[in-house]
Image (tube, rainbow, N blue to C red):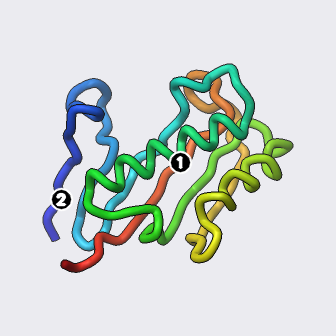
């Protein structure tokens, strides 16, 4: 199994000591993603932005949200669980991934949610 780091215009190499995603076919491992544009807004807006970012990363890796098999959601406050779950349900209506949700004592940049994902790259 060969490892390939995602590098693109939207996710250039070298900004941080992590990769936005690592491809180890048939899997894609997406690093924890937090919001950027919606910091200071509510949990619904932040969750939507984070899932959209993950969706974009997966598309660059030739897969999609439909192929996500596992996600971990980190919430700064478990009281936001129901609102986060409402947005999550919008994206994963028919075939949800396995998921873990935990409260993190402090997420970097004081955001409300961070999510990582593992997806399958379908065979061509």
Label 2: element kind: loop
Q: Quadrant of residue 76?
A: top right
- Residue at (59% x, 59% y) in the render: 91
Kindly give the residue lying farthest to the bottom in the view shown: 123
Q: Is residue 54 above or below residue 10?
A: below
Which residue carries the number 1 mark? 51
The number of numbered discs placed on residues in the rendered structure image is 2
Q: Position of residue 123 (x, y in %)?
A: 23, 79
Give the quarter of the figure containing the C terminus: bottom left
- Left or right: residue 24 versus residue 29 is left
In front of the other: 37 or 115: 37
Name which of mark 1 and mark 2 comes first in the sequence: 2
Query: Few, some or many C-alpha atoms within 10 Å of disc 2 (few <14, some 14-19, many ≥20)?
Result: few
Residue placed under numbered mark 2 in the picture: 3
Where in the figure is residue 82, as x and y percent of width and height? 82, 52
Q: Is residue 110 above or below residue 98?
A: above
Which picture quadrant has residue 106?
A: top right
Instruction: Determine the CA span between mark 1 and mark 2.
Output: 24 Å
Q: Which mark is residue 112?
A: none
């Amino acid at each position: 199994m060969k490892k390939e780091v995602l590098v693109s215009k939207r996710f250039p190499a070298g900004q941080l000591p992590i990769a936005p995603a690592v491809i180890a076919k048939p899997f894609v491992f997406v690093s924890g993603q937090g919001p950027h544009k919606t910091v200071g807004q509510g949990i619904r807006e932040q969750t939507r932005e984070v899932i959209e970012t993950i969706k974009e990363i997966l598309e660059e890796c030739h897969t999609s949200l439909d192929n996500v098999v596992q996600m971990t959601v980190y919430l700064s406050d478990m009281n936001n669980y129901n609102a986060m779950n409402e947005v999550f349900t919008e994206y994963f209506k028919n075939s949800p991934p396995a998921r873990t949700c935990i409260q993190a004592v402090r997420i970097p940049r004081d955001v409300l949610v961070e999510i990582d994902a593992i997806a399958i790259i379908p065979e061509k």
